[in-house]
Image (tube, helix red, strand yellow):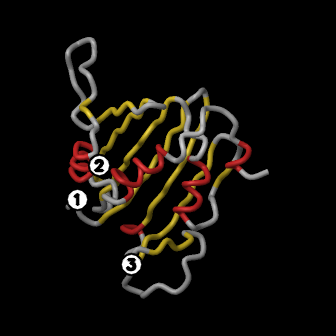
Amino acid sequence: MGVASAFIGGAALAGAQFSELERVCLKTHADPLAVLSAADASGWSPTPANDSGRQDDLSRVKTTKTAKLTLTVEETAAADGTFNRVCTLTSTPADAAIFADAAAWAKVRPLATDAEIVGYGFIERDGQHLDSQKPGDLPSDFDVHSHLRYLGVIAKRGQSTAIYTASVKSPN
């Protein structure tokens, strides 16, 4: 039984979570400004202020007929000069289609998998996903580190979370 069929829980949302993930995280390569711009243009709202009145400028929420979606994005500088971008989208209740949607999009074999978690690591080159463990022939000057990508999916306790990370050479 595969990961997608092994996941039982939450109502099927016909890929609603992945559709939003693709629109705001994947197509923007997790660039924080582009993610927030895409989210705002797609009807996402800033997260409500917490009890102390602080609001997280890098988070958004969206309520659909079937789920509450929460989006966060961040970018950190690595010691080697690359920037690591992380875009996370959580659905409550869990989106039962998220595992199959992630596998279809990644198009590489998973690095890790079980009934609640699956992760895909790949190298992105010219819009193609190359298996990070067997990328094939790459030019000697190709900077693999700044083209590494990861898509992970976790589903438990009534939620599903998709995490997309991208390493890039410069922040813009």
Mark 3 falls on what kind of element? Answer: loop
Hey, which residue is sitting farthest right in the picture?
Answer: 1
Mark 1 falls on what kind of element? Answer: loop
State which tag comes first along the sequence, 3 or 1: 3
State which tag comes first along the sequence, 2 or 3: 2
State which tag comes first along the sequence, 1 or 2: 2
Residue receiving disc 1:
171
Q: Do the residues labelled 1 and 2 touch (CB within 8 Å)?
A: yes
The kind of residue on which mark 2 rests is Glu
Query: As rendered, which of 146 and 155 lies closer to the eye?
Result: 155
Task: Judge from the rendering whether residue 4 lies leftward or rightward of residue 169; answer left or right.
Answer: right
Q: Which mark is residue 8?
A: none
Q: Residues within 10 Å of mark 1 (few under 14, many from 20)?
A: some
Mark 2 falls on what kind of element? Answer: strand
Which quadrant is home to the C terminus?
A: bottom left
Q: Position of residue 14 (x, y in %)?
A: 54, 45
Residue receiving disc 2:
75
The kind of residue on which mark 3 rests is Asp
